[in-house]
Structure formats: C-alpha cells, structure tokens
Image (cartoon, rainbow, N blue to C red):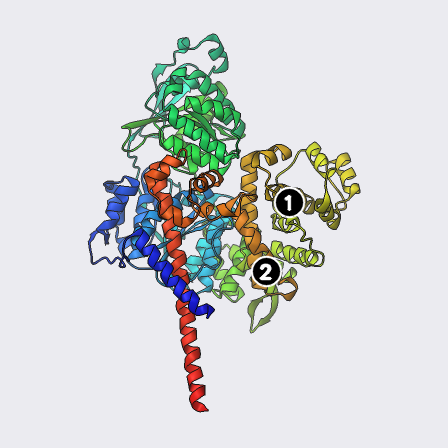
Amino acid sequence: MKNISLISDVSTLKRQLETTFDGNSQKRLHVDDESEFFGLPNKVKHLFKKHKKITQLYDWQIECLNLEAIKTRKNLVYALPTSGGKTLVAEILMLKELIVHERNVIFILPYVALVQEKVQSLCPFGLNLEFNVEEYVGGKGKHPPLHRKRKSSLYVCTLERGAGLVDCMLADNGQLGGRSVGMIVVDELHLLGEQKRGALLEATLTKVLNYNQSKYNIQIIGMSATIGNMQEIGDFLNAYVYTRDFRPVKLTETIKFNEDIYVINKDIDGSVKTKLDRKLHFDVYSDDMKRLDPSGIGLLVREILPNGSCLIFCPTKSSCLSIAKIVYKTIGREETQVKLKEKEELYKALKEEGDGKVCPLLTRSILFGVAYHNSGLTNAERKLLEEAFLGGILKCICCTSTLAAGINLPAQRVIITSPYVGRDFMKRSTYRQMVGRAGRAGLTESGDSVLLCQENDKEKIKVLLESGIEHIDSCLGTEENVVLSMILSSLSSGCTSSQQQLIDLMKRTLFVQQAEKRNVECTVASDLIESCLDKLRSINAFDKPVEDKLKLTTIAKAAVAANLDILEAQKLYTELLEASSALILTNKLHLLYLAVPYTECITLDRQNVLDIMTNLQGDQQALANRLGLNELCISQFYSYGKIKNVSESIWKKFLMSLILNDLWNKKSIWTVSETYNLPRGTIHSFLSRTASHASSILRFTEALNDKKLDHFPMLFQNIVPKLNIGILGSSSDLESLMSLPSVRFGRATQLFKAGYKTLNDVAKANKKELCKVIDHLPLKVAREMIASAKLMLLSEAESLEELAESLRADLNQSMSKSKENLLWF
C-alpha cells in the first residue's frame, strides 16, 4: 500500500509543478525545430539575450565554434586574454552536448565561488532547455550521482570534486547517473602548473585521455588565459589549439612613479617604452589627506567617479582593509549621497547575514561606495558586495589577487598598489589577469590600469612587463600522494590491471612527456610506477595478485570511492574503529571531531588555546579525556608551545571541533570569530573543507560495508547537510531555502519572514515582489533564484517519478508471479 501511495503522490506533485511553472508540460527540445544557432534551437539565442544580455558573438567566437575540430569532436584548447569572452564558447558547446546529443557534461572550475556563480547563472537555461544542473562543491552532490534517465545533467564542480566524478564515470563505463558523459570542460587550464591542485588536474585528465583511447569519445574542452607553451599542453591533451589576442574594449596600461603617470607601450621587439601621460594633482587634498594617502590612490579613484568603477589589487589581506580606509576617507563626501537607499539596503543585507552585526569598516566605507573583498569575509558577505559592485552601488573594491582569477567583476579602472603578491614578486600571468579586469564590454569604450612603482622595484617591473607568459611545468612528479591516488583509482575502475598498463598510463602524463623531451632515453614513467607500487605494497594496499593482476584491498577501494588518499583512508579506518568502541553521542562533538580533516592547519593563539583548554565543560572534557588530552598536555603546551604525548593532528582536530561545536550550538559566526580570534571567512572556509571531508567519510564507510562501522553512515548523514549549508546552528526550516545557489543565512531568514518558507513558495514567486521584500536583491539574482527553485523541485519530482515507475514495475512483476503461482495450485 505504501508503494501505491508513493506512485499516486508523485504523479500529483508533477502535475502541480507543471501547472505552477508553465501552465502545461513542455515537450523535449529538438534541433529540427529551429537549428540556426550553431546547431542549437533558436530559443538558446533568446535565452542568452534575456539572461546574459548577449545579443551577438565576437568574430573569434564564431570562428572558434565553426572549427573543424569542433565538428569532428576533437579535443580543443583555446586561450585568450582575460575578459575576451571565453566562457560563452564553452557554454554553447556544453548546451549542444546536453540538449542535442543528450549526453552529460562535467564542468570543472577552480574555485568554490566560481562553481556557485555558474550554477546560479545556468539554472534558467536548465529550466528552459530541460537539463539538470547539479552543484558539486564541499559536501554537496551525491557520489556517485543519482540516476536520471529522462534528462541529461550538467555537473558543475570544483577540481577536487571533479576528480571524484571522473572516477565514478570510469568505474561505470563512461556514465554518470545512468547516462553517458560526452564532454568535460576545464576552466583556467593554466592551473596545471600549480602544486598539488595542478597535479590532481593533470592526473584526472590523463585518466580520461587513457580511457578515451580504448573506449568512448569524451571530448575535452580546455580554456585558459594565454600559456607560454600552449602547443605542448595541446599535445598532452591531443587537442587542437586555438589562440587569439582579443579584447572587447581597448586597454591602456600605465605605470605610476612618484606623481607622474606613464603610458606603457611595447616595441616590435617586445621592449617597453613609456611616455608621460599626466601628473597627479595633490592640491585637492588637505594636509591630513596627503599624510594618509601619499601614493595618491584616492586621487586615482576620484578620476573615474562618479560614473566609473575601480578594482584596487592589494598585496595582502590586511592591506585590503587599510587601503579601503584610505580610499573612503579621500574620495570626497559627494559619494555618500549617491544611491543612498541602495546602500542602506546593502547594509541591512550584510547585517542579516552577520546575525545582527556588520564589520565596522564596511559599515562606514559602503556609505562612500567603497568596500574590501578578501578571504576574511564570509562567502555570503563577499557575494553581497560583488552584486553591489556589478549593480553600481559600490564604485570601488579593494581586493587580493585571488579575485582576478575568480569571479567576473570587470571595472573601468584597475589599480595595482604593489607588484607583489604576499612576499613574492608577481608573475606575468598574474599581472595580465589583473589588468584584464579593466574595461566593461557594452558599458565602456575603454579601460585602463595603473601599476604603482617604487624606486627599488623599477628594474623588476621592467622585466615583468617585457617578459613573455610563463610556461606550464608539470608538478605531478613531486606530488607522490596524487600519483598513488591515480594508480589506485585507475585499478579500481578497471581501466588498468597490471604494472605495464600503469606505466603506459603514466606515459600519457604531461610530466613524463616533458621529461622525455629533456631526455629521449628517459625511464621516469617505469621508475615512478615501480617506486609507487613498492610504497603501496609496503602499506598493504593490495591483496594477493590474481594472474599477475593487481588487486586492491577493501580499504583501498573505499578510499577511491570516497576520493581520499590511501594513507588518509587507513588512518581514518583506524580512528573510526577506535571511536566506535566508545563513541560519545550525548551531543555532536565527537562526530564533529571525526569530521575535521587531518590536513587542517589553522593555528590559534597560544593564550587563546590555554583559555579554551582550561575552561572545558561536560562533553568537551569527556572527549578531551577520551583522546588523551589531559592536564599534562596543557602544561606541556603552556611551557613549550606543543605537546609530546599526543599526536599533533589529534590536538588540532580537537581544537577545530570546538569551533564546530560552538556553531552547532547556535553561537553566531561573530561570537565564534571573537572567541577563537579567527576571521569569519577563515571559519567559513574551514566549514566547507569539513563538509567535504564528512561527505568523504560517509562514502568511505558506505563503501567499506564493515559491520564494525555500519552505524557511521547513518550518523554522518545527519550532520553533512548542516555542514553543507555552512550555518550549523540555523533553524532546520531554513535548510531547503539555503540549498538555493544564491541564498545564504541572511537571505533565507528574510525569505522565511516574508512568507517564502519552502522551495515551492520561491518557485511560485514573482521576481519583482521578491526584490521588494528582500534587501539588496538584484532583479537578475531574483530571476535566477526562482529558476533554481523550479529546477530543483522538478528534478526532485522526476527522481521520485522514476522511483515510482521502478516500484510499479517491481509490483507488476510480483503480481504476475503471484498469478502464476495461483494458477499452478
């Protein structure tokens, strides 16, 4: 009876959704309807116009989309300067794969904020063109993905989660969610040269390339800023290489030395020539302003006001705050009267996100249209400031170099206050990314950049400006854990089974290809595989081989399923066994302790730690005793700054679990930030990493299927959703609202108070009404929020409908067998 009731309920829900959203059920789109937009229905062109304000493509985009490589499904790598319009080409190619070929797509992005931005902006396309948009970041996203028979899916993911999705795909004969994967798109491909993350990306792409050779044709699309050895990267990916030096608006690069500003020009031979453009006039400054801003940063901002916007790149997080303070005190009080109502709404929205508190500096600076943007702010605060900047409410943002490589915030002017990133002199590629943010297509005819130069940096800056773009060199050979994971995942998926096949796999890597160019007789592939196999044997990652085929242990297979490296998985298994014998379940503290990643490296002040450890109460003290953290440990820490009789990872994990426990017990992020003397953004980033690790533990224990640990999947299923939304102590009523890509605690609270208490309420909302009741909600974001809610509900309804159909089939089969048995008797 329960199954029949479910079938009935699902049918009713689907009818309600269709009536609510569209008035009737939409039929599946086919290219034959109108195939005038690069093989896509003409409807796609209208969607780009409506949701992205794109009315026509640049010549290079048309040329790229019509390449023979695209028509023959050859891999493609294309590179253009920042703001050249690379993403649009990838989106058109992805849409074609999703709705024409009806195959799934994996879209890999480097940063969490970029993933969330893309999910939000692509949901209206998913709703109108009938494909699923699934977010894989932190602990979000099922692993392996849910089966979706009726629609193709776009998996938008971080690099780490993308590696896990590729492993799932390889283990399931090229499928995710019951449908074949046709395309993998990688943004910021130049990250291949980074330590660890670059090595992980290289290993992931190598497995796909090796898999493609013998199985299905999965097209790889890589986009990047200009790379020095682009053809070498193309050869590694077996891809056609397309490069153009295109910018939609003119960029004028300048350099400031003392009070003089020089235009930078390059001769044919690449040498830099400078020409005096103008002088900064400090006479508009009072004596106090001159002392406060001797570099004239405020004057540079003044030049583009009142209509322009400005990004100021700062070398450190702390300098973002100090320069924001300088700017708002020197740009003039006239800005306080511009868009005053919108600024008040922004302040209210920030206050709601901060549970009643706003950073004192932002409280003052946003009145002048100025803000800072760095990792010390929460994701929600940064998102609000980004929206305000795009909407013209904020005119100036002081930020670190991370913003240049992340979200798309173009400005009329870019100011680089120092040629350093932290303590390191900036790379040419970093400089190009920063200045590439100058100029807004459709809004300004040109953009300009100003690099502030000190006397002792003149020669270095000359070299920076005259040098070419850096080459990408593989870091895979220096990242042993990544190589070990690549070996294990390749064996687990069945793509390889012997040492020789692993050597062949290693030969496909960029690392080996570059090594062989340096030495034709290079044996690095076989040497590295042999060394790693010896390491894996020494830690008992293999069962006894069968006919010379390498066979993984249960723990090694579970490590692959959970996207954990093998050493971490073995450590986790031991810790879970120990914990299960005396698990403290009177509250969530012990589970939160287990969820903290081993690699967590946040350091607390010594006095702060002593205050915390000498004031433990109840379950906190019980867990400390359980872990061996006694008075002797505190004494050792007080005397030496470290403890000797308990491992450092246990000590750090316990301290971090106290942060999570305070949040779980509904202490505000501000209170926790003050208690532990940590930036709010640092705490939120830690939450995201913990959510990802907790999700991995859940998958690890499920894959193990070990009776001694069979209670852990259920326990972690209860805490992962809370960790995902990032506010542990929030009401469960807000959880569904906070699953929307553009909604955090503050907006969820405002939605709930305004009567939008469920996803269904949001899906039925009018976008203009939402903007009226939610502080600082841009119309575009409101439209995307509604589309996201509709898409999520439809996806859920269709999943239930598929489950109902499966149950109906099982029921019919059961009834058929019953009839046969009845006839038999």
User: Do tag 2 and tag 1 residues touch (Cβ < 8 Å)?
Assistant: no
Q: Nearer the viewer, residue 413 or 267?
A: 413
- Kindly tell me whether residue 53 is visible in this rendering: yes
Name the residue tied to disc 1: 657
Q: Which badge, 2 or 1, is on the more N-terminal residue?
A: 1
Q: Nearer the viewer, residue 717 or 115?
A: 717
Crowdedness of circle 1 by 10 Å Cα count: few (<14), some, many (20+)? many
Which residue shows up at 27% across the image and 39% down it? 53
The quarter holding residue 408 reads top left
Type of the residue with mark 1: Ser
Q: Nearer the viewer, residue 96 or 18?
A: 18
Name the residue tied to disc 2: 701
- As drawn, is 619 to the left or to the right of 308? right
Q: Does 338 appear above or below 745?
A: above
Q: Secondary structure at mark 1?
A: helix
In the rendered image, residue 613, in percent from the top left (x then y), is placed at 72, 39
Label for residue 665? none
In the rendered image, residue 735, in percent from the top left (x then y), is placed at 49, 47
Type of the residue with mark 2: Thr
Which residue shows up at 28% across the image and 58% down it? 25
Q: Secondary structure at mark 2?
A: helix
The quarter holding residue 676 reads top right
